[in-house]
Image (cartoon, rainbow, N blue to C red):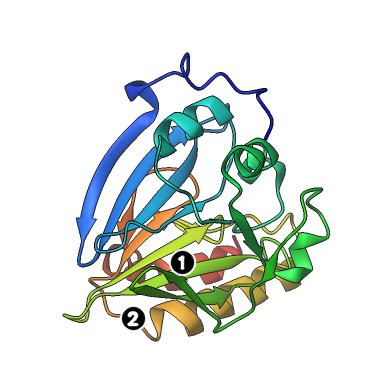
Amino acid sequence: MSDAVDVENAPTSSAIAGVRELCGLRVTTASVGPHENNVYLLECATTGERLLIDAAAEPAVLLGMIGDGRLGQVFTTHFHYDHWGALREVVERTGATTLMHPADAVGVPVPTDIEIRDGDEVRIGDVMLRAVHLIGHTLGSLALVHAEPDGHHHIWTGDSLFPGGVGKTHGEPALFDTLYRDVVGKLFDIYDDSAVVYPGHGAPTTLGAERPSLAQWRDRGW
């Protein structure tokens, strides 16, 4: 594997935003790169299997975050460069399997090993997550949903849903309509207000915190 990344001299705790313990799943978050992308390392509490969401930037930071444990998979939410800039280095160093929607995989010059579509299950050891296809920010944007046994849900949304609105649709009203419809129909209409949203940039939020603004988002068109 490549030795291009100096893990021993990687930046350390300043990039790590925190660790959250869910039922069966440990989530470590880092913020990297000039766009302050969130990177999420998900680890099964029983098997130690791990999946990284968006190898965005600063491969040395990400490899330091991963450490000596095995990384099984890297899930890329969409094809924009700020979400996969460190993908090649991370995969070369870890041997991880790459996962992405085929509509966006064509825009990433790192081969996608497993194509993920709407409703597909993504396993991390004993934990099963469900992929949700949200069209609009890109044609192949994906979210991942973790359902805890007590009914609480956790949703990693990439750039499709943030605190304060859906992702950019580049001034295309039809794409906004599609993204708004998908976010409402596949997330807000299905999961309750306690569902936690982990966006590609910025702080986590909940569906309950964002739900009162849905009509405003629709009316403003972004």
Which residue is depicted at the point 38% across and 68% down? Answer: 125
Which residue is depicted at the point 56% across and 43% down? Answer: 94
Residue 10 position in % (x across, y down): 47, 19
Q: Is residue 130 left or right of residue 181?
A: left
Residue 149 position in % (x across, y down): 20, 80
* Residue nearer the viewer, 52 or 6: 6
Q: For the image shown, how many numbered marks are present on the structure?
A: 2
Q: Residue tagged by mark 2?
A: 191
- Residue 137: image quadrant is bottom right
Q: Considering only vertical position in the picture, is 63 above or below 184?
A: above
Label pair 2/1, CB-CB below 8 angstroms = no
Identify residue type, mark 1.
Gln
Q: Residue tagged by mark 1?
A: 216
Which residue is depicted at the point 28% across and 63% down? Answer: 209
Quarter occupied by the N terminus:
top right
What is the distance, in whole Å, between disc 2 and disc 1 at their CAs? 20 Å
Mark 2 surroundings within 10 Å by alpha-carbon count, few (fewer than 14), some (14 through 19), many (20 or more): many
Residue 219 position in % (x across, y down): 54, 69
Q: Considering only vertical position in the picture, is 96 above or below 63?
A: below
Q: Secondary structure at mark 2?
A: loop
Residue 6 in view:
yes
* Residue nearer the viewer, 156 or 61: 61
Tell me the number on the disc at residue 15.
none
Quarter occupied by the C terminus:
bottom right
Q: Is residue 44 left or right of residue 113?
A: left
Q: Is residue 45 left or right of residue 98?
A: left
